[in-house]
Image (cartoon, rainbow, N blue to C red):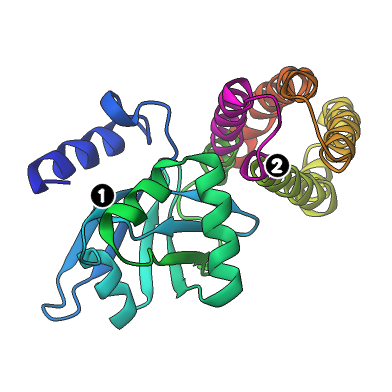
Amino acid sequence: MPMDFNQQIIDEFRANKGQVGGPFEGARLLLLTTVGAKTGARHTTPLGYLPDGDRILVIASAGGSPAHPAWYHNLRANPQVTVEDGVFTYQAKAVVLEGEERDRLFARAVEADPGWAAYETRSGRVLPVVALIPIDNGPPAGPMGDALKRLHDAFRRELALIRREVAASGPRLGAQVRVNCLTLCQGLHVHHEREDGFMFPALEGRHPELAAAFERLRAEHAVVQELLGRLQELLAAGDVAPEALSIEVNRLTAELEAHLDYEEEQLVPLLNGA
């Protein structure tokens, strides 16, 4: 992408918490900042990405150019990078995938978007697939209530993306959409386990007057977990009709969004020290 066009996307992305218009509207997009291999200067590039469990994947397509993009050369020299996903900014380790793993994940990307195959053909090279693995930087900066809201917003955005992807699926559900759904299931399960095991006990010890609210939140966690289990069972059943998956995702969305709204109403003021 031309530099001025890149900067327009970067500015819009940052101003709108990851939302952009034009050709990338509704797409999975991140900002990747690398350190120049020769200059040591920081360079930020908008890229499409694919969820893959605890990591995300980016592909060095350069729009089908015969040469690898500059960001790829940079991360080969300096694999610690900065990722902005519209909700969080974090450090990550970049790992270039090779062999069977690279081929399998590239095939999954092509299934989700045949444009990747067209880029590879046009480029005349094997397009590198890079895994970005988050580095633990400790607790989030700023008030804890704001951090909780940002995490909830990440779940809301992921649900919206998955609903759009399921709706756009053909007669069969693609492998990448399955991974996206399972990644969401995993993230929600871990988040709720941490709340039940650590955050809720700490807060209710200081705020016994909110016992009923914590009881409701735990009950809602159980309902969400049941819906996540049904979603996982459906995804494990082999061929899944997108219509059937859409019903389950919409059911989860309605329950989860109501839960997130209530939890923020009850807990964000406490966590922010109001």
The disc placed on residue 112 is none
In the depicted structure, whether residue 152 falls above or below residue 247: below
Judging from the image, what secondary structure is the residue with disc 2 in? Answer: helix
Front-most of 165 and 11? 165
Quadrant where the image shows the C terminus: top right
Q: Residue at position x 29%, y 68% from top?
A: 72
> The disc labelled 2 sits on which kind of residue?
Arg
Question: Main SS type for the magenta part?
Answer: helix
Precedes in sequence: disc 2 or disc 1: 1
Query: From where the camera sits, is residue 48 visible?
Result: no
Which quarter of the picture shows residue 246? top right
- What are the residue bounds of the magenta stretch? 153-178
Residue 63, label in figure: 1
> Which class describes the residues within 10 Å of circle 2: few (<14), some (14-19), or many (20+)?
some
Q: Position of residue 198 (x, y in %)?
A: 79, 54
| Towards the viewer: 15 or 177 | 177
- Amino acid type for the residue under numbered disc 1: Gly
Q: Element under label 1?
A: helix
Please give left or right for residue 226 compared with residue 188 in the image: right
The residue lying toward the viewer, choosing from 34 and 235, is 235
Q: Is residue 146 left or right of residue 230?
A: left
Residue at image position (86%, 34%) is 234
Q: Residue 181 magenta-drawn?
A: no
Residue 102 picture location, percent across and down: 53, 68
Is 156 magenta? The answer is yes
- Report the residue at 89% width, 28% height from top: 223
Q: Which residue is mark 2?
A: 178
Mark 1, Cα crowd under 10 Å, few <14 / some 14-19 / many 20+, is some
- Residue 271 visible in the current orientation: yes
Q: Position of residue 124 (x, y in %)?
A: 29, 63
Is there a contact, CB below 8 Å, between mark 2 and mark 1? no
